[in-house]
Amino acid sequence: MYISVLIPTFKRASLLSYVLEGLKKQTFKDFEVVIVLKPSDNDETESVIEKFKKWLEIELVLQNSGYVVDALNLGLKRVKGDIIAFLDDDAVPCIEWAQRHIESYKKRDVGGVAGNVIPAKFEGSKIIEIKGASHIIPNFRFLSYLENIFHKVWSQPLEGMENYLVYLSKAGVVKYNSNLSRIAWRQPVESLLGMGANMSVLRKAIKDFKFPNSWILGLAWEQFLGWYLWKKGYFLIFNPKASVYHLIHGQTLTRSIRNYRRALLRCIEHNLLFYRLYGSEPSLSLLYRITWLIFSSLINLKKFVIDKDHQQIANLKGKFYSEMIGLKWLLSKKIGDGTYRPLLDLQKLNR
């Protein structure tokens, strides 16, 4: 099988070089790299790409406008592989990464594979793994009696996702199953994909798929695509051996107003998944959604009052804005002309 590795990138020349170095060292060699670049002034990304063309089959696609999902749509038009593997421009693949993804498709009807995303830091020019940490596998812990009640009330998975590591709840929220934590470190488990930093899909399974133009940051696009494959009857798995190192860096970690707005936008886009799927996924429930809003908002308030965690204010505002945008979207579909574009409201919040 032939793999197309799809990497959207913007202003990450120094980090992209580590990613391409990781691809250069792969044990499996039968792949192309499709890089969708949104150019910017004073960035050396094109020079980095040109350097690695000596070792890798790279196709560069320039993105003149739009956001992350627009970059993905551009890349999906250009890929040639039987398998499309998604990588972030700050996610360095382990040496057997491509091989592990290929092996995962040997099981019948597998349509998508999520790999582990392990946080790592720099020590000089070396990449050092943070042992025992994962962005996908949740920390195992026993839930309190009250937390168990809350979980049963507002974290119920969609029917058929009860044993998924990453699943979608009936409230339309992406959740992680801590009961599978210990197993997921050792062997493949079912999962509604994971992070775009490290996942792959069968190209023929998404032949007619295109991301709608309703994202800026692209939060939960992975689960949107995973849900699409799941509804088509494909088997989705998480393979812990298909790993990448997610580089911890300071390029976007400033305390500016801009960064606060970005945190708010992340929250809003993540919560909008419910409204993206509502009407197409019959297991989603407005009652579960309202219950989730009440309980999760109370938890946000508690953490703010007791722990003085100011991120909780952004979470509360994010819930408010996501429901306002979502209800406008829903009403436009139900009783309006269906022309409402949530992207316009998201762009206003991103200014």
Image (cartoon, rainbow, N blue to C red):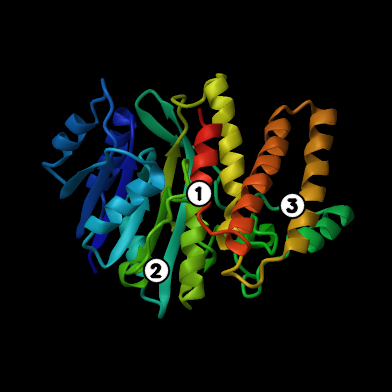
In the displayed orientation, state which residue is furthest to the right: 145
Q: How far apart are marks 3 and 2 (CA)?
A: 29 Å
**Mark 2: few, some, or many residues within 10 Å (few <14, many ≥20)?**
many
List x then y, in percent, for residue 58: 17, 47
Q: Which residue is under mark 3?
A: 141
Residue 35, placed above or below residue 276: above
Q: What element carries label 1?
A: loop
> In which image quadrant can residue 264 be found?
top right
Q: Nearer the viewer, residue 35 or 261?
A: 261
Please tell me which residue is depicted at 62% across the width and 70% down the height of the picture. Answer: 161
**Any part of residue 220 in sight:** yes
Please tell me which residue is depicted at 68% across the width and 57% down the height of the picture. Answer: 178
Please tell me which residue is depicted at 55% across the width and 40% down the height of the picture. Answer: 345
> Is tag 1's residue or tag 2's residue first in the polypeptide sequence?
2
Q: Which of 245 and 319 is in front in this view?
A: 319
Give the residue type at disc 3.
Arg
Q: Which residue is under mark 1?
A: 341
